[in-house]
Amino acid sequence: MPDFPKDFLWGVASSAYQVEGATDADGRTPSVWDTCCDQPGFVSDGMSGAGACDSYNRVEEDAEMIGTLGVDAYRFSISWNRVLPGGTGAVNPEGIGYYDRLVDALLERGVQPWITLFHWDYPQSLFDEGGWLNPDSPRWFADYTQAVVEALGDRVTHWMTLNEPQCFVGLGHSVGHHAPGLRLPRPQVLQILHNALLAHGHAVQRLRANADTHRIGWAPVGVTGYPDTESPEDIEATRRYMFDRCPPGESWSFSNALYADPVILGKYPDRSYGPVIDELPAFDPEDLETICQPIDFYGANIYQGTRIKAGPDGEPVEVPAPPGQARTMMDWPVTPEALYWGPRLLAERYKLPVYITENGCATTDWPATDGAVRDPARIDYLDRHLTQLARALADGVDVRGYFHWSIMDNFEWAFGYTKRFGLVHVDFETGARTPKDSYRWYRDRILASRG
């Protein structure tokens, strides 16, 4: 495998609702995910995040597990409704105290905390007031950001505002597969998108005002393409696939440019992008000034890609997958090239350093009779994808770090506990953690990169 620079940042990731559990402890109030999990059929196994990995009660154990892995950083999210049980207003001392302890436990082990402010668990109390459709929602998010950064900003220097807005906007409000489970008309979904981007901009302003040492980004997801051949025509078609057209049908919300262009370039795509642009809400031009705050890095969540070739007119054409293509337990194709072309084209367009803030796979793994958890498919997936990422660095792409998703098996949203992404196996009945073979492989790969 090609080398990574010695200052390359290695990390692992999780999110609050997926690992914390303790959903009714110490003043925490429900989120939209708690509410949706109570609806029969919403989660495939009928479960919820009420127990999850019980990380709320295992701060020292989990910090030690992460520290022993040898990573530089742990990316985790804050539960908005744990910190502000009313969504706005008074801070819950017990709620923020959990994150206070977690931050300290990580720092004691030489692990940098990288905080994501919003990873989908929107307070139910605010959803009852209109949620992201309420014009006050960006201010609510800004005030929540203020509460978190005032408590933790003396020790935390790396922040992400929104995780995968494409998911909570599109899957949550357009197709209804994620909380809050709505299928709204597209103009309303676009209003939600716009308000979420405004929330991002306001949050960046609050973070910057707290300290000029903060490093701030976000962690979107979007369609990733890779060229069928490395001909100029196929590369250009891949670029157009990622940025110059809106994904068709219900996939429109997984656009890159519709979200990232306003945040980084200060404008929405023009009408040639597709009919979605005609349905954008009317907004004050000053909104774009708020949305387009300077950020320090582009966090890219990339799990898979689509092979693209140039059609007769140069239009991007999707190349069908070959028979029997390798697929993960999420039924996602194994396409390591995505971790070369995704960062390369994102860095080219947006001129920002890139961190891979999520990459990983769900596989079938369980403790063997000797207690070991062998996951060779995950090791192979990691090896192939990191090889492509190292190739991107060798070709001059400004990639600064990699976060594996995830540190441990957890509550996988609408799939419940049926999909395992972790480097560490979790017994969801006992809470027992068992490092898998991939945990040791990743640890050794990190050590090797440091010489």
Image: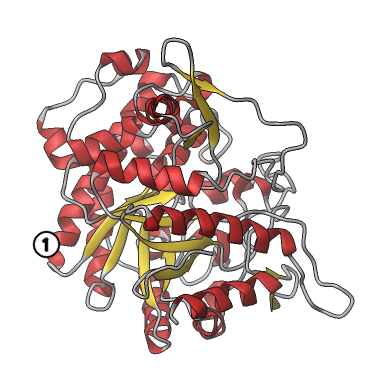
**Helix, strand or loop for disc 1:** helix
Residue type of the residue flagged with mark 1 = Ala
Left/right of residue 303 with respect to residue 107 in the rendered view: right
Q: Which residue is drawn at 24% across and 19% down?
A: 270
Splitting the image into 4 quarters, where does residue 8 fall?
bottom left
Of residue 309 and residue 129, the one placed in the foreground of this image is 309
> Does 190 sit above or below residue 44?
above
Left/right of residue 380 with respect to residue 236 in the rendered view: right
Q: Which residue is drawn at 26% across and 71% down?
A: 157
Splitting the image into 4 quarters, where does residue 20 fall?
bottom right
Q: Residue at x 26, y 21 (%)?
A: 281
Give the percent coordinates (x, y) of residue 265. Answer: 19, 36
Seen as rendered, the residue at the extreme right is 369
Give the percent coordinates (x, y) of residue 107. Answer: 37, 84
The quarter of the rendered structure image containing the C terminus is: bottom left
Of residue 451 and residue 401, the one placed in the foreground of this image is 451
Residue on which disc 1 sits: 209
Give the percent coordinates (x, y) of residue 114. Answer: 36, 67
Viewer can see residue 183: no
Of residue 254 and residue 147, the one placed in the foreground of this image is 254
Give the percent coordinates (x, y) of residue 414. Answer: 63, 44
Of residue 50 and residue 346, the one placed in the foreground of this image is 346
